Amino acid sequence: MFKYTRYLKRPKVILTLLLVGLTLWIRLRLLGYGEMWWDQSITLNRSLEWVHGGPLPLSSMQSSFGVYNPPLVQYLYALPLFFKEDINGVVFLIAVVNLLGILAAGLATARVFNWRVAWWAMLLFAANPWAVYYGRLIWMQSFVPGFSAMLFACVLLYFADDPKPRYLVLAALCLSAVIQTHLTSVALLLALVAIAGVCFRRIKLKPLIVGTGLFVLTFVPFLIFQWQTNFADWQTLQDGLQRPAGTNLAGVLLVLDLLHSKGIYGVLGESADLWQSLDLRWLRVDDIITLVLAGGGSVHSSLWPTGEKNRIARLPPERSSFCFGYVCPFWPLSTTPST
């Protein structure tokens, strides 16, 4: 008992528990404050119809691009609705998936880099206002940050730590989940192919075949839907790709607004009232995040001379460059809201 008590008194354990508590509180408090409009009503009604004995959903709702989405989100929504027809259960499931993504990515980062890198990466993900907002919103894209973080964890562990077969198989399943919850996530395939090309010697054929097979199997219901509709989505996709493309600078403008705004509320638009509902009576949420960042920075600065050595220093050069090259673009991708 004394051994565990002494372990819990370690600064990194205390800071990690503090981060977990902040993450839980900011995502699970007042679950009833959630937006509900056309998208939510369509997807929830389809899942409820299946729960009440209707046919298995083979697709989800139609996207703004004109193509139908895969049905994975309908199955995910049906899990809590099967036990209790309460919308808060669906919100809770979305929050839990995103929490598991933060935990998985943090553990993988700690294993490859060190605990400090993992703690700060988890904090940036946990406290990101858009990651929190979409991590509580009933929307197909809300699962993307969690599943993409799990994908990050599996790929990082496989290529930069230990190429265990289960990491590659789980990565294939996570990739399938990311793509099925938002089709634009198929762009991740380009990054994964590039990584596989650089580190092809670490790829084992058997788990690659198993993972690929499971990846394809998860799309069987959607492929059946496409067959029944004579692959109409393919024609819609071709027509859409022939239209001129535009550049969306909303993400850049949001960052510029955050640089000179007072807190996060000024850039959240209509959702500002929902975010403010999370405030304590005497302390704002973004003030809490600021205090945690400042306190964490102070503690880390004081511990740096005696802290653990950076594990990256012991990695071969090619693995070190892979780690830095992969981590830098992936975390922003995981925390950027889908459109």
Image (cartoon, rainbow, N blue to C red):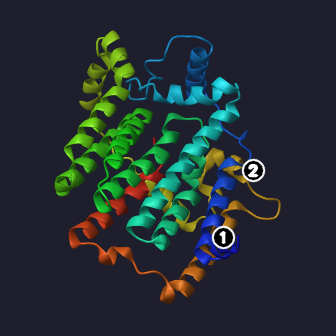
Q: Look at the image and tell me whether residue 88 can be seen.
A: yes
Mark closer to the chain start, 1 or 2: 1
Residue at numbered disc 1: 4
Along the viewing direction, whichever of 49 and 127 lies nearer the viewer: 49
The image position of residue 330, as x and y in percent, is 38, 56
* 331 is higher (above) or lower (below) than 81: below
Q: Quadrant of the C terminus?
A: top left
Residue at numbered disc 2: 277
Toward the bottom, the furthest residue is: 305
Find numbered disc 2 in the image and state the secondary structure of the residue it sits on. loop
Q: Quadrant of residue 14?
A: bottom right
* Three-letter amino acid code at the position of disc 1: Tyr
Q: Quadrant of the N terminus?
A: bottom right
Residue placed at 41% from the left, 39% from the top?
178
Q: What whole-number distance in Å separates the C-alpha atoms at marks 1 and 2?
A: 37 Å
Toward the right, the furthest residue is: 281
Residue placed at 36% from the left, 63% from the top?
328
Q: Look at the image and tell me whether residue 250 can be seen.
A: no
